[in-house]
Image: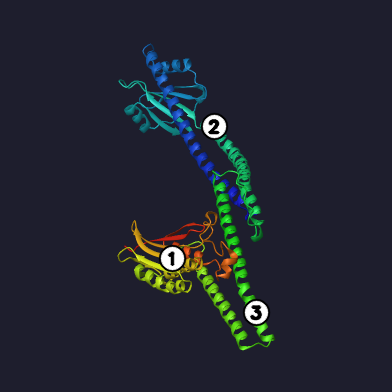
């Protein structure tokens, strides 16, 4: 039961509300009690002053102080209150009938305080008593008015009963409402939970319902949907990569197996064995290149930048070395390779081996797709503080609709021709990853029959 979030929320809510209600009840109770006592004191003071004023007027007409007190008390009737008229020494001169023979004992200290301050308030035998002098100029005596404290106690007792009944009732109703609100609010989370449970690796295209994007649960659902989108993209990319890699590996393996089986089952001459071994060697080299490319691609991180070697790399030397290596391949196809270094010494921080592999991939592609007699150019310049490497050729070119896809893994514009040339569609994908890992950019400009131009921009070392 207590494992439920809605139950725990309700209990926490009820606990906080109970503490708040109890604290509020105490504050209200004591504030009300104080107000009741202050109001009682004020009423008693006002009544005592009224008695004092009437006594002063009456004593001017009567010769006897006691007679004046009896007249005043006879004329002024105060229900539920006791009135005494005292002489200057505190002896009772007159009293209301409800006091009978029970005089209110007034201490000398209370009389002295009333004489000095004009008012004295005391509590005697469960009575609240207000004492005022008849006159501040003459010692005529005092008027004392009393009221039982029980009148206030009765009101406070009723207030306590209301609290005893009201606080639990309010707490019960509020807890029920809190449970309902918690259940209603968490119903969307329960729905999200059920929908998420139905999403598997085979069903990553499903998404959570987003009923209100502006609140926290809507933002959570949107975040989960974004996560599912990324997971779906990653799974599809992984599946496509595995399928493409398997397809690329299947062809050379089939050639190797077939050629080996033929060589083992049939007796051949030396020249035929040589041809078979040459074919096996070529396919093995192709497999080696493919496995090496796959290993390089495996270094690509999924969700964070690659951790590369950070060493000082001379782009001038790197470009010259790559140009010399590509010159051998170009000469085999009767191609002319031109290298132009149009800048001074250029240095950056990075992985020299990966940068060399990137540039050789671009040059190798240029050699593969340029017909004999064509030209290949490698230019090193600077632009806006970045190093700029440009590889252009006079090859077959790339259609405009294909240019956005050539950097994808295993993508080839002309699949049959690419396979015949030994390509697996990984060179440009590796090149783009290496450039991106070095915080650079790579672009292509091409047209069918007019050749291609690949431009790489890399930030230089500060």
Q: Is residue 395 left or right of residue 345?
A: right
Nearer-the-camera pick, 27 or 195: 195
Q: Which of marks 1 and 3 is nearer the N terminus?
A: 3
User: Residue tagged by mark 3?
Assistant: 257
Q: In this view, does 260 lie above or below 93?
A: below
Q: How crowded is mark 3: few (under 14 residues within 10 Å), some or many (20 or more)?
A: few
Residue 50: quadrant of the picture? top left
Dots 2 and 3: beta carbons under 8 Å?
Answer: no
Q: Where is residue 40 in the image (x, y as percent from the top left)?
A: 46, 28
For residue 34, say whether it is visible. yes
Q: How many marks overall? A: 3
Please rate how many residues cluster around mark 1, counting C-alpha atoms within 10 Å: few if below 14, some from 14 to 19, many from 20: many
Q: Which residue is drawn at 38% across and 11% down?
A: 61
Q: Are marks 2 and 1 in contact (CB under 8 Å)?
A: no
x then y, percent, for residue 130:
42, 28
Q: Measure the alpha-carbon separation of dots 2 and 1.
A: 106 Å
| Residue that protrudes farthest toward the right in the picture | 265
Numbered disc 3: secondary structure:
helix
- Is 378 located above or below residue 206 in the figure? below
Q: Residue at x 32, y 28 (%)?
A: 116
- Residue visible at 51% across and 65% down? 369
Q: Mark 1 points at which residue?
A: 376
> What mark, if any, has residue 155 been given in the picture?
2
The earlier-in-sequence mark between 2 and 3 is 2
Mark sitting earlier along the chain (2/1): 2
Residue sitting nearer the eye, 363 or 451? 451
């Amino acid at each position: 039961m207590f494992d439920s979030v809605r139950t725990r929320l309700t209990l926490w809510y009820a606990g906080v509300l109970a503490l708040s209600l109890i604290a509020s009840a105490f504050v209200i109770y004591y504030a009300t009690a104080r107000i009741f006592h202050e109001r009682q004191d004020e009423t008693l003071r006002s009544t005592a002053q009224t008695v004092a004023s009437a006594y002063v007027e009456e004593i001017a007409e009567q010769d006897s102080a006691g007679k004046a007190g009896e007249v005043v008390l006879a004329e002024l009737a105060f229900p539920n209150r006791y009135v005494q008229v005292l002489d200057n020494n505190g002896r009772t001169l007159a009293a209301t009938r409800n006091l009978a023979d029970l005089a209110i004992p007034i201490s000398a200290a209370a009389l002295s305080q009333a004489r000095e301050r004009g008012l004295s308030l005391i509590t005697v035998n469960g009575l609240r008593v207000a004492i005022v002098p008849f006159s501040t100029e003459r010692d005529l005596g005092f008027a004392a008015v009393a009221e039982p404290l029980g009148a206030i106690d009765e009101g406070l007792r009723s207030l306590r009963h209301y609290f005893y009944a009201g606080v639990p009732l309010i707490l019960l109703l509020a807890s029920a409402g809190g449970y309902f609100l918690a259940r209603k609010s968490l119903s969307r989370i329960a729905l999200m939970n059920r929908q998420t449970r139905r999403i598997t690796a085979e069903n990553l295209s499903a998404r959570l319902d987003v009923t209100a994007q502006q609140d926290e649960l809507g933002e959570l659902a949107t975040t989960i949907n974004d996560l599912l989108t990324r997971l779906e993209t990653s799974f599809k990319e992984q599946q496509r990569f595995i399928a493409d890699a398997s397809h690329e590996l299947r062809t050379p393996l089939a050639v190797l197996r077939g050629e080996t089986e033929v060589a083992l089952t049939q007796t051949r001459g030396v020249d035929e064995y040589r041809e078979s071994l040459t074919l096996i060697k070529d396919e093995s080299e192709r497999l080696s290149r493919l496995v090496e490319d796959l290993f390089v691609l495996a270094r690509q991180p999924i969700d964070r930048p690659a951790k590369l070697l950070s060493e000082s790399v001379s782009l001038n030397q790197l470009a010259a070395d790559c140009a010399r290596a590509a010159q051998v391949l170009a000469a085999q196809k009767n191609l002319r390779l031109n290298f132009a270094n149009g800048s001074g010494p250029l240095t950056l921080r990075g992985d020299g081996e990966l940068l060399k592999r990137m540039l050789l991939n671009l040059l190798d592609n240029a050699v593969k797709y340029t017909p004999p007699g064509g030209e290949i150019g490698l230019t090193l310049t600077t632009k806006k503080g970045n190093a700029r490497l440009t590889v252009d050729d006079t090859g077959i070119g790339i259609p405009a609709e294909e240019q956005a896809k050539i950097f994808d893994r295993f993508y080839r514009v002309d699949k049959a021709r690419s396979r015949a040339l030994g390509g697996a569609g990984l060179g440009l994908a590796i090149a783009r990853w290496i450039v991106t890992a070095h915080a650079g950019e790579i672009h292509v400009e091409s047209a069918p029959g007019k050749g291609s131009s690949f431009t790489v921009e890399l930030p230089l070392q500060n």
